[in-house]
Image: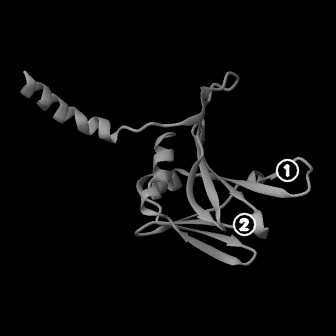
Amino acid sequence: MNKILLIILFFISPVFSHSQKCNYEKDKIDESTQLVIKRTAPLTLCKVNGHPFIFKSQQIGDRKYLKLRYYKYNNFSITEGSKFIFYFYNNKLMLYPLDFAIKQNSNQNGFSTISSMIVYELKKEDFETLLNNPVRMIAVYTKTGIIKQEIKSKQQNNIQHMLECIN
């Protein structure tokens, strides 16, 4: 009996090892449009300028998005409308933000902007590329030039995991 149980567990275990837990900020069907809306919980990919680059993935109906929140301390800012580059082991992907998507967050007094969110709409090819390739490095354009940041090996699959949650 114990041998049979062990054999069953042996064959079932790969199923569990490939399953994942998705954490969502939102996972519902919009009452008025009947569109599926999913937004993953924030996930840090790396640090740039000493502060985290925080990503979320979002699905609204058939459309898919990648959202980046970054902090603007020490006069750091991504150049408005510039491309964001993901480097993989064998190729790269350039994303351009949606025109309306650059969103500034000000502190309570409105004196300074502490963070920005940039939204990138993912075309089907972009989505598939990100879903199937670990991110090795990113590059962003700032007013002082391009900044490239290597991604730690344990975080290279973070974007893939988020996108699997909205696939």
Task: Determine the secondary structure under disc 1.
Answer: loop
- On screen, residue 139 versus residue 70, left or right, reads left
Q: Position of residue 141 (x, y in %)?
A: 68, 71
The answer to whether residue 80 is visible is no
Quadrant the N terminus occupies: top left
Task: Determine the secondary structure under disc 2.
Answer: loop
Residue drawn at 44 percent across, 54 percent down: 157
Task: Say which residue label 2 marks.
Answer: 78
Q: Nearer the viewer, residue 155 or 161?
A: 155
| Above-or-below relation of 115 to 143 | above
Q: Nearer the viewer, residue 60 or 56?
A: 56
| Residue 64 location, quadrant | top right
Label located before the other in sequence (1 or 2): 2
Residue drawn at 57 percent across, 53 percent down: 44
Q: Position of residue 101 (x, y in %)?
A: 74, 52
Residue drawn at 77 percent across, 68 percent down: 74
| Residue 73 location, quadrant | bottom right
Q: Position of residue 4 (x, y in %)?
A: 9, 25
Q: CA distance from mark 1 to mark 2?
A: 19 Å
Looking at the rendered image, the disc whose residue lies closer to the viewer, 1 or 2, is 1
Numbered tag placed on residue 71 in the rendering: none
Q: Nearer the viewer, residue 97 or 116?
A: 116
Q: Amino acid at mark 2?
A: Ile
Numbered tag placed on residue 107 in the rendering: 1
Q: Position of residue 47 (x, y in %)?
A: 60, 63
Mark 2, other Cα within 10 Å: few <14 / some 14–19 / many ≥20: many
